[in-house]
Structures are given as C-alpha cells and as structure tokens.
Amino acid sequence: MGDYNTIRSGEDRPIGNLVQEMEIRDFNNFIADTGLVEMKTSGRSFTWTNGHTYSKIDRVLVNAEWMLTMPHLEVWVMNPSCFDHSPLRITLEDVEDKAPKPFKFLNHLAEHKDFMTPVSKT
C-alpha cells in the first residue's frame, strides 16, 4: 500500500495532461511481472490533487494468496482533509455486529385470519 507516484490508465487522470502510453507501461509491467493485483476501492475516485490535476496514484497491491486468505479485504479512499493525498483505509475482515437484537412484534400480524393456527401449534 502506498504512493506509487504513477497512474495505470487514462481513467486514473481524467483531469490534467493527456496520458501517454510510456508513463503507464513500466508500472503495469511491474504489476503483471510480480503477479500482483490492485484491490478494489470505494469512496473517492482520486487520491492526489494539486488543485488543477486529479490522479489516482496511491493504491493497494496484493497477491492472490492474500485475496484467498482474506476475502473481505476492502480499501476505502478517505477525504484528504488538509493534505494533497487521500489516506487509504483497509478493512481486513467483515465485522459482524454480534450484539443481541431486540425482539420486534408487528401487532397488525395478530389480526390476520390465520395467525392463531401456527401460534397454537408451538
């Protein structure tokens, strides 16, 4: 995870200088050669700005073993606040709320004509 200071495609910098093939080739080759994949992100589309150009240059790269071991991995691109880079937050697991839920009974169900049949069987 980090600031790779480069983009992977024209979608990573739609506002700014036109993307040239030579500026994305080396990084894309590096990712392919190492067998890494970029994790899907949620939140903001871009991770860096100078006020005129917006780019996605910060990213999280993982290998296939990580993806199989931790299937709930998720990257959230947060608001940059007063910095030019947006912080990235990784959620490593799907946290389930295990607190007991309050019982809810919908009174209108008791008015249904067949309500007492299943209730009397228990």
Image: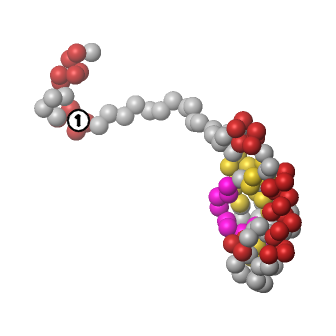
Read off the residue under disc 1: 109
Camera-side residue: 104 or 85?
85
Q: Where is residue 117 in the image (x, y as percent from the top left)?
A: 17, 22
Q: Does the magenta stretch include residue 42?
A: yes
Residue at the outermost left position: 113
Q: Where is residue 84 in the image (x, y as percent from the top left)?
A: 82, 71
Whether residue 43 is situated above or below residue 52 in the rendered picture: above
Camera-side residue: 98 or 67?
67
For the record, the magenta segment spans: 40-48
Residue at image point 72% right, 74% down: 10
Q: Is mark 1 on a helix, strand or loop?
A: helix
Whether residue 12 is situated above or below residue 119 in the rendered picture: below
The quarter of the picture where residue 78 lies is bottom right
Q: Where is residue 122 in the image (x, y as percent from the top left)?
A: 27, 15
Residue 10 visible in the current orientation: yes
Name which residue type carries label 1.
Leu
